[in-house]
Image (cartoon, grey):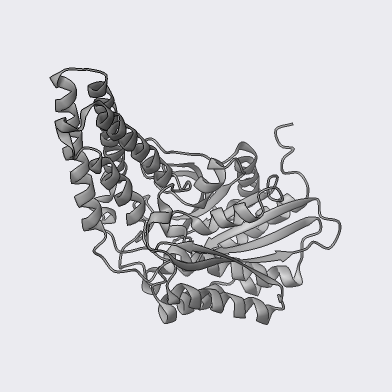
Amino acid sequence: MSKAFSAESLMAHVRVLAGEIGPRPAGHPEEMRARQYVRQVLHDLGYYEIETLPFLTSDTWGYGLGYPLALALAGNLPGRKSGRTGRFLGSALSLFSGYTLVQTARSGKQPLAALAPRNHSATLLVKIPPVNTPERKLVLLGHLDTNKNRHSFKPQWKKLLLGMMTFGIGATVSNGIAQLAAALGAGEGANKMRKASALAIALGLLVTLYDEEGGYVDGANDNATAVACLLGLAAHLKENPLQHTEVWLAFTGAEEVGCVGAHALLDAYSAELRDAWFLDFEMVGTEEIAYVTRHSGLSNLSSYTPDAESLDWAITTAQKMPELNIQGKEMVITEEVGTLRGRGYRGLCLVGVGEDGWLANWHQYTDDVAHIEPSGLEKAARFAWAMMEELDAGVVGKLAT
């Protein structure tokens, strides 16, 4: 086994990112320090052409939830006196807010993002050419930023996550329909529905504000483990480049606020990456490692799946490495594969599975170095390398035929 994939080598990166640097909010100096660390490690490995893709970002996903809810609520303020035109406007605001919440729930672009306070962030990109003529392109993804400690993700509450988000989306859509019905001359029933849904929207806004009061977490599992795996693969690739596969390492910023760094990557290279393969690493600091077969998104209305070719790629690799015991899992999760699939790209996620079947220490203060299982990093890196070799062999993409 390559020394670059050893648990000890990979954990050294986790300790710097989560232990020494600590919480890394999107667009804050600590996130920039994480980028500087990655850049220095890559430079020391001999990678000198490191591209920076800058962008502006907010520092919490609360804006992606709070702004749409506030906008929908504002459309209800004039009450009966607003008249037909006001009802049409209120309906449009609520329906647009429902659409925005769905985008947030599945890592799509957020239409109201520009309204939030924003700071500078970036995605770091390294392109590693193959030995021979490139025949395909592979992008490895791992994000640098961390989220807040959230009440909604506590063990006793997290099973309500999807239902709460679905309820919020349903309330905004119901409010929009009720206001449209009122504008078209519906009776008192439409007004009662409008009032009830407006009350639900207000409740959702209060819950969102309450969920924002926590501090930022160390992010050892989410997602220093992923960055460590990418750096380990970078070290191994330096001595063992692939034959016909160009590998891009993308250390993305601002994943936790809407996968902004992944969107920036696709915006910059949309055409060049159209036929690329993508492998995303998420929270691989647990004993059990899996590939995700179905992602929940953050609501019952926003699930997504990997493309069939990428799923076959993972299944075939797992069958050839039974000693790693890597299996497919349906997970409650939203991440950069949602961004990829929503924009029509391939995408597959490698993930760590906690003892309860959920992501371990997800958006909790317990997401620190002490709660990492080092063997998970080693397993994830080894499996990813086996997938890369399988792709380079040229059989992937031909499985269906």
The answer, for residue 174, to whether it is visible in the render is: no
Indicate the position of residue 286 as horizontal and vertical percent values: 44, 61
Q: Nearer the viewer, residue 10 or 123?
A: 123
Q: Which of 101 and 20 is in front in this view?
A: 101
Q: Is residue 153 above or below residue 26?
A: above
Quarter of the image for residue 386 reads bottom right
Quarter of the image for residue 199 reads top left
Tally of numbered tags: 0
The answer to whether residue 129 is left or right of residue 88 is: right
Residue appearing at x 42%, y 71% in the figure: 24
Indicate the position of residue 54 as horizontal and vertical percent values: 56, 66
Quarter of the image for residue 251 reads bottom right
The answer to whether residue 192 is left or right of residue 212 is: left
Q: Is residue 26 above or below residue 203?
A: below
Indicate the position of residue 152 as horizontal and vertical percent values: 26, 53
Q: In this view, does 331 lie above or below 181?
A: below
Image quadrant occupied by the C terminus:
top right
Indicate the position of residue 248 as horizontal and vertical percent values: 68, 61
The answer to whether residue 262 is left or right of residue 258 is: right
The answer, for residue 230, to whether it is visible in the render is: yes
Q: Which of 33 and 391 is in front in this view?
A: 33
Residue appearing at x 60%, y 57% in the figure: 265
Residue appearing at x 16%, y 26% in the figure: 191
Image quadrant occupied by the N terminus:
bottom right
The answer to whether residue 9 is left or right of residue 271 is: left
Residue appearing at x 80%, y 61% in the figure: 130
Q: Which of 250 and 271 is in front in this view?
A: 271
